[in-house]
Structures are given as C-alpha cells and as structure tokens.
Amino acid sequence: MSLPADSSVLATSLRTDPCGLLRRHDVGRTVRLGGWVHRSRDLGGLVFIDLRDRTGLVQLAFGPGWSAPEVQASAAAVGVESVVLVEGEVVARDADRVKADMDTGEVEVRVTALRVVGPAVTPALPVARNRGDKMPAEELRLRHRYLDLRRPELQENLILRHRLLQVARRYLSDNGYLELETPILTKPTPEGARDYLVPSRVHPGEFYALPQSPQIYKQLFMCCGFDRYFQIARCFRDEDLRADRQPEFTQIDIEASFIGQEDILAMAEGLVVSLWKEAGVEVPRPFPRMSYAEAMERYGCDRPDLRYDLALQDYTPVFRALDFGVTSTAIANGGRVRGLVVPGGAAWSRKQVDELEALAKGAGAGGLLRVRFAEGAYDGPIAKFLTDDARAALALREGDLALFVAAPDRISSPALDRVRQECARRLDLVRDTDRRFLWVLDFPMFEEDPDTGALAAVHHPFTSPHADDIAAHPDAPAKWRALAYDCVLNGTELGGGSIRTSDPAVQSRMFALLGIGDVEEQERRFGFLLEGLRAGAPPHGGIAFGFDRIAMLLSGATSLRDVIAFPKTTAARSLFEGAPVAVADKDLDELHIAVAADVTRGAISPDGQGA
RNA sequence: GGGGGCGUAGCUCAGUUUGGUUAGAGCACUCGACUGUCACUCGAGAGGUCGCGGGUUCGAGCCCCGUCGCUCCCGCCA
C-alpha cells in the first residue's frame, strides 16, 4: 500500500478517512467513509457490509440499536460494487468477534447514515472472490478491465509499480540525472524491430514512427551537454507478443557523459538495489560479473540462471580419442562435444531422457548423446565405445547421467541451455526465493552470419569496441569485444546498455564493417545522430531497464498484463476500448491512405465477432 | 507466418469418449425467512443463439470443414 506519510491528506469534504486504516485507536470517533460494497451479509435484524477502497476493507454494521429502519433497509438492498457514502461511529469488536486476518478486524463502523451515490449493475465479473475460485478468463478480465482492476491483488501490483517509479525517479534525480522527454512521433528506424507507423496528414505519403526506444535522442542529449539524462520512457515495437512482451512497454532509460563502463555499472546497481529494497528485498553489492564468453561456455546462454550450477563442460578431448562416428564427424568438422553431468539423472526413464533430446532437437541440435552410470555400470548407446581413459575423464559418480551435444557451438549452446534448464526444473534445483544478480560483460561486437559471413552489430552500431581488441586484432573484427553489458537476474535480462562510440574515426570504421560504408546511406539512416556527434560529443554511455518486467518480478505476477493497467492481448488488441478499429473513409482520405479492400474488417463487437 | 490448449447460464465448470427425451452443478442474481455475520445460513425462483458460419445425419453441445476470440510456445523481437 502506498500512502502519504500523513494519511489524513486522504480526508476530503466527503470522507474523514479511507476504509482500510481504521484501528482500535479510532474507537469512539464519528467517521464518514466512501467506498465500494465488496460483500454484504443480511441477517434480517442485522446487516453487515464490507466496504472497500484502495486502502482495504472495513466492516460496516447496521442494526436496530443505532441505524434507522430506512438506513437498514437500504443497506440490505444495496448491490455489490455499488458506491456508498456512510457516516457512523467506530466501535471496538468484542474479543470473540475480532477478525484477525483483516487489518481493520478489531473495529467496525456502526452506521447511522447511508447514501448510495453510485449504484452498480450486477458486475460482469466477480470482484470479491471466494477461496478456491478460479480466475475469470483473460478475455473477460481485459474486456471488463474496470472491474478486474478493482481486485485488491491488481491494485497492489499497480500501487507497487507506482512506488517503484517514485524510487527510480528519486534515485536518479538525487544522482544528478535530469528527467527529459523525447518525442513520440519520430522517424522510422532502419533496423531492429518493426515500427508502428503513423501517417502524416500534412505530408502525403510520409510517415512518423513511434519510438522503439529513445536511443538516438538520449545520445543527442549527451551532445547537448545534459550530461545525465533519464526517462521513464514508453517504447513501441510492432512484433508478436509473449507473456513477458507487450507492444508498448516502459523502460527506465539512462545515459550519462564523461563516464566509463564502471560508472554505469555502479550507478545501475544502486538503482536496482533501491528498487528491490522498496519491494522489501535486500540485495548485496557488488553484483557478480561474468564475461559473455564464459556465460556461453559454461551455460550456453548470455543470461544464465545462477541459482543452480549444472555447468556445461567441453568433452572434446575425451571423445577425440574414441572411435565413435557421430562425435568424430562433428569434431572433424570443427565442432566440439559439450555436455553436462546430471547427478541423479540416471534414475530417469528412457522416455524422460528422450524428452530432453526432443528439447535439444527443438533448439536445433541433431541429437542428444547420453551415458548413465548406475549400479557401477555404464549404460547407453555410447557406453561400449568408452575406453578406460574416457571413463576416468568423464569421472561419473553413481547415479549420474551425462548428456552431450556434438556440434558447432552456435548449435550446442542453445540446445544445452534448454537441456540444462529442464534438468534443473526436474531436479527441483530452482529456489524461487533465491536472487542471483549478474553482470554479463564483454559481449562480442559483431555476430557473423553463418552462411554469408556478413557482420551484424550485436548491440547497435554506436556501441564502442574494446580499444585493446582493435589494437590486438586490427583485421579480425569478429574477435572484438564490445563495451556492452547486460544486467541479469535468475536467467532473466533486466536491462542492458553500452558505452557509445564518440570517436568519428572508429564510427566510420564500424559503418564500413557493417556494410554501410556509403556516406549518403549513413546520412539517410543515422544523419541526425551523426550530425550531433560531429558537433562535439563527450564520451558517453548508458543503460535501459525493462520496467514492466521488473514490476512483474517484484510483484510476483506471472504476466506483464498483471502489472499494466490496460494491456494488449497476444493479438495486440485492446479489448477494453476495442482498439484497433477501422476508421471512416473520410479520415483515410485526409491521411492519403487507402486500405486494400480484401483486408477491410470492422472492429470487434461485444460478442467477440468481427463486424 | 507456424504449432499446442481453451470457448456450454453473469462467473467457474461438468456434459463431447460412444450423436438420441426437457443441457446440469457451485457461486452470483431475484423473491421470502433470519439480531453478530465476516465465503452467513435456510427456502423458492429466474437465467442458455452450447463463440460464429456451413456441412454430414432422421437427429449435432458432441462428428467434419471454415472462421472469430483468448492463451502458451516457435519464428520474430534486445
């Protein structure tokens, strides 16, 4: 719950108190309250109403000793979710009537006057839910969001979200960061995710884009001399959704000048620590660090979940000596044999291990080799190929299951990553209360297309390479590491960023390597940032955190939809107001837009059907 | 773009396997009873285009085809 230090500011001309804060020390006071009828219990001679506002519930009691007959009659008649104003006296409950699981359970309000100011139709969804009730369908919750958002759980999530926003603002502002806003109508970006486009009325055939992030603007702020910037920025990406992905989302976006990587990491750790502290969790600093290379080698993943180990190892030397076709071929083709040892995995059935193999194949691997060591014997298709040396090198212990993928790293890493995660889940190694923060550093500057060999920026084209890597391998950019970093918690990426290139010479080298050496092409795509950088740019860098995901983690929600007031469905629709919709021809004409006739469809109507 | 799950009363679900009389339950709702409940209790009642369209059949909630919506995942997305 988020309340002002002095909760009396919540008093208004219509109410003296919020509902959920009445306590024993209020006994004897005459109070006026306003709220929603959460539940009511009509006993004939007595009526009880649980009155709800965002601070909680309090029991109203109506009885012949203190309520006039007409007051009691309207209390008995008022429907749930109606809004009422009441006046009455706070009284202590008898000891045997105290409700211990209710914050206001020691008191109740004996009502002398009641006004139904907002009568409610029977709600389409229950707001007050009984123990064991299942949640209404997501579709209905979104369609009737005005009711869903009344539920105390969702209110708590959004109130926590508010508190986290305040903490972020306070932390950054106290550290000299300026909250600066950037445009929502902006220029389409040439790469990355698909843009949401907005047609221009004034300029026929031209379009704005909604920002995927304020990336370019925040670098321009650095060029302007606003040397510390932040923004709680709404970002838009027109890609397909997931439980943890919405088309519009919120980032805590940060950029600073005259800094190096260590400055950003320290500042960002401080922010994360203060956010988690607000949610009641102490996080130790500094966060451990791991290079991208080590993360990929040991976990097959650039955001490893360190709550359990099950680290991957390189078994190529073991298999190189064996006469086994699959592994020999893979090694001869430049691949490696990597794998992991699963203690206790030998107890799994053939079928269970087949399921792991299916996961590995789903991630692109050709197969998953297995060997188990149980009751002193090796078992599995490759068991008979194992020499004494190989057995010694594997060092399996009783009950172990060893799993291998023989392939190039770009295939074995994602496959073994999935296998490792599933093994941890099966062995129940994941403790929800564990929080393993991690910085992943030294991302590669480029990734090579396995077919064409073309280079693409892993982060973005303005990320700075390690100066020593350029010096050591001037002609092997694939070996360059970037000054880029990700903040990871329990296998989830919370945020990431980089130190930017501010040296024009390095920047043009980067463009050339990325295949955009043509100056006109550079200007067309990045002109306004390049102009800014040429006009005198300080060394700068930054980071952005996915705020919705952080709010989701800290509230314990399992979907972003539970920490966003009005989220979209997986089809990017807003069921509440019914967006998107077809618009009148007149509006399209003004925008110089024509809709292809065969895709014209109406908005969804209340029965869920297309018009 | 592809795959899985779901769609029956206001809400949550059963019924679909094997097509067959009038589609059921709990909660909510309406009416009645009840002076200490807090998931009040008890009695009575009302409430259904079985998502939508088409097909097969003497007959479809159930089988087939299409479609719409929600959801999870892959692709996509940093």
Image (cartoon, coloured by chain):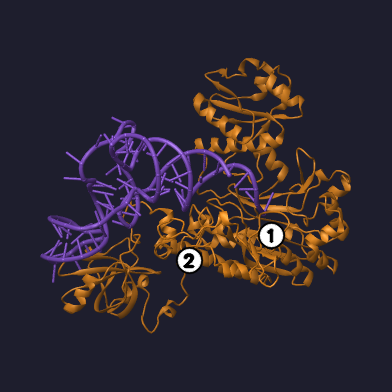
Q: In which quarter of the image is residue B27?
A: bottom left
* Spot occupied by residue A136 in the image (x, y as percentages of width and height): 38, 54
**As shown in the figure, which amino acid type bears the numbered disc 2?**
Ile
| Residue A352: percent from left, percent from top | 50, 28
Check disc 1: other Cα within 10 Å, few if <14, some if 14-19, many if 20+: many
Q: Is residue A607 above or below residue A357?
A: below
Q: Residue furthest bottom?
A: A13
Q: What chain does mark 1 sit on? A: A
| Chain B color in figure | purple
Circle 1 — which element?
strand
Sequence-wise, which precedes: disc 2 or disc 1?
2
Q: Residue A427's spot in the image, x, y percent?
A: 50, 35
- Residue A515 is situated, as x and y percent measured from the top left of the image, at 83, 50
As drawn, the label of residue A543 is 1
User: Which hue belongs to chain A?
Assistant: orange
Quadrant of residue A519 in the image? bottom right
Residue A410 shows in this picture: yes
Q: In this view, does A17 lie above or below A54?
A: below
Pointer 2 residue = A159
Residue A348 visible? The answer is: no
